[in-house]
Amino acid sequence: MQIRHASIFLAVFILLTANLQADEKFITVNYPPDRSVREFFNAGISISIPLQSVDKINVKAENRVEGDIIPDSNTECFSVPLIYGINKIEITAFNKNRRVDQVVLNIFRRSDIESAYNKPPSEFEKTMFHLTNNAKCAQCHIMNPGQNDKKPITISSFSDLSDKENEKTIKPNSTCFPCHKSITSHQYVHGPASVWSCLSCHDPDSAPKYNVKQPRSEVCFGCHTEQAAEWKNKKYIHGPVNIGKCEICHSPHSAPNPYNLMKPTWDLCTSCHNDKKSGRHVLGGMFFKEGHPTKGKPDPIRKGKELSCASCHNPHASDYPNLWALEAEGPFELCLKCHKYYYK
Ligand code: HEC
Ligand code: HEC
Ligand code: HEC
Ligand code: HEC
Ligand code: HEC
Ligand code: HEC
Ligand code: HEC
Ligand code: HEC
């Protein structure tokens, strides 16, 4: 009897203390708020923990990424790569291998080219970090831009600036680098971003802070003067270029595809022109049931490149209907550019 009593008492006691532990909050998320919206590939996260009661933090983004952080300070910062749509990020704190707290952050990555993700669900909101009170961050980070964040860059000056020796010193010199280093982590990095000339596009004196002027194309054309001169005089301008949204297709920072494209060309085009995937439109159903190939073959004109939508259409502008590339004035002339042999 006595023993049973004691064990019940013990069990109740353990349950009570376990409950107490679970209610205690060890993780404070400094940024971002739950249900934020992002546009690009990564989210920066900053949390605070009491160092004496947390000796390990596990960060997990569903089945995609997972890693441990051994904290050496009361504030820990990291960044998580994002997929389109809702990213559920679990941050779990441990003390001597016992789980002591968990926070779940939901971040929505929005996209102009993925129709399913054009609009975040209603409970999600786009937040602005640089408008919030950042006194806590200022303990360790420099919160105001410095001289080095706006290096004057032009297309022709770029080759001098981007040499390897320079790049090493340029990165630590940027006040943006410590917090935004993952923004240039993809293989193809855009010129000004690669040398951390962030203020070439982001105006620190604008409201909201670091806003990029609209239309975006004017910002781009500020440096890409050759394209500006060429495209502005064309008869036909592609929809998304016409509304000035170059960043729909090109990351201004870095991307896993050539020309800093948000997706490989064929995937990019078919995200909006889903009905052209079959290539049936090329032949207008005249010759074959199955369509003309639009990928997976070498491009006969652009040596070394794969056939894609851009083999026949200029992604930006053209003097010819249907944005024909290759200076083709009509469909038949277009065919002849690649199929000389059949008709000669
Ligand atoms: C106790 C010091 C400290 C405080 C306070 C602090 N940070 Fe950090 N943070 C760091 C250090 C150190 C790094 C790593 C820098 C590096 O690797 O160059 C870092 C890196 C970052 C990164 C990049 C993480 C990555 O891996 O890509 C972000 C984002 C960040 N901090 C945001 C913040 C924000 C937002 C705040 C304020 C809410 C903040 N930090 C407060 C020390 C701090
Ligand atoms: C203390 C860390 C920190 C520093 C320093 C910092 N940023 Fe940020 N910034 C962030 C975080 C966190 C976000 C939220 C978006 C994200 O997760 O990338 C952000 C967002 C932004 C945004 C999106 C708009 C907004 O306010 O949310 C821009 C643009 C930006 N930063 C530019 C810059 C530039 C340019 C610099 C350097 C002059 C800089 N940042 C320095 C942490 C920092
Ligand atoms: C060529 C112009 C250009 C340069 C250079 C540039 N950015 Fe941007 N950045 C943009 C544009 C355009 C956007 C999209 C803004 C929007 O949609 O509101 C953007 C958005 C951002 C965002 C918001 C990301 C999100 O997920 O919403 C951050 C953070 C940012 N830039 C940081 C930086 C940093 C840090 C640098 C320096 C390495 C930099 N940018 C250099 C043009 C540029
Ligand atoms: C501050 C000047 C500057 C601005 C503003 C700028 N760019 Fe660039 N861009 C460059 C430089 C420099 C290069 C690298 C050229 C090189 O590699 O020789 C480059 C390269 C590129 C490339 C790759 C070209 C190639 O042939 O590989 C693309 C695509 C591009 N930029 C698009 C954009 C878009 C879209 C914008 C607007 C959001 C923009 N740029 C704004 C300076 C700029
Ligand atoms: C609909 C998607 C799309 C939009 C919008 C777009 N581009 Fe491009 N851009 C591409 C593709 C695809 C390529 C690569 C074409 C190829 O494979 O030859 C490219 C290539 C480029 C290049 C390098 C080759 C060249 O033609 O000089 C530059 C520079 C460039 N784009 C700048 C811009 C600027 C500036 C804007 C906005 C005015 C813009 N782009 C808007 C899809 C786009
Ligand atoms: C963000 C969505 C989007 C992307 C990505 C996109 N387009 Fe378009 N495209 C449009 C819109 C919008 C129009 C204009 C439709 C209209 O006027 O009926 C258009 C029109 C066209 C036209 C017809 C132009 C004409 O004169 O009738 C062609 C050809 C075309 N796009 C090719 C491409 C190619 C090639 C790519 C990839 C490099 C691409 N598009 C990527 C949205 C997109
Ligand atoms: C081999 C050349 C070729 C390739 C590759 C090609 N197209 Fe076309 N495209 C054409 C021709 C020819 C037409 C005109 C068809 C017509 O007038 O009926 C056209 C017309 C279009 C139009 C405008 C007419 C309409 O029906 O809206 C769009 C948009 C378009 N193509 C998008 C694409 C996309 C996206 C891809 C890549 C998946 C692609 N094209 C690949 C040759 C090509
Ligand atoms: C940018 C180059 C390009 C253009 C422009 C082009 N084609 Fe093709 N076409 C190809 C390639 C590449 C193949 C695949 C050849 C192979 O299978 O090796 C192909 C295949 C074909 C085939 C299948 C028979 C064969 O030779 O394999 C026909 C038919 C055809 N094209 C007709 C047309 C017609 C009609 C047009 C104009 C509306 C046209 N093509 C425009 C590149 C082009």
Image: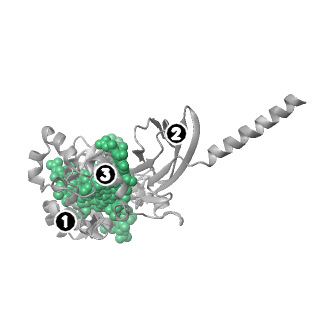
Which residue position holds label 3? 261
Question: Which is nearer the eye, 47 or 201?
Answer: 47
Q: Nearer the viewer, mark 2 or mark 1?
A: 2
> Relative to 71, is 303 on the left or the right?
left
Mark 2 residue element = loop
Across and down, in percent, residue 107 comes to: 48, 55
The CA distance from mark 2 to mark 1 is 61 Å
Are the residues at dot 1 and dot 3 in contact (C-beta closer than 8 Å)? no
Q: Report the amino acid beneath label 3.
A: Leu
Q: Earlier in the sequence, mark 2 or mark 1?
A: 2
The CA distance from mark 1 to mark 3 is 19 Å
> Relative to 278, is 245 on the left or the right?
left
Mark 1 sits near ligand 5, with its Cβ under 8 Å away: yes
Q: How crowded is mark 2: few (under 14 residues within 10 Å), some or many (20 or more)?
A: few
Question: Which is nearer the eye, 98 or 279?
Answer: 98
Q: Report the amino acid beneath label 1.
A: Trp
Q: Can residue 18 be seen in this view?
A: yes
Residue at 55% of width from left, 31% of height from top?
96
In the rendering, which numbered label is found on residue 53?
A: 2
Mark 1 residue element = helix
Mark 3 sits near ligand 5, with its Cβ under 8 Å away: yes
Question: Which is nearer the eye, 309 or 68?
Answer: 68
Are the residues at dot 3 and dot 2 in contact (C-beta closer than 8 Å)? no
> Relative to 37, is 186 on the left or the right?
left
Which residue position holds label 1? 231
Mark 3 residue element = loop
> Relative to 145, is 266 on the left or the right?
right
The CA distance from mark 3 to mark 2 is 45 Å
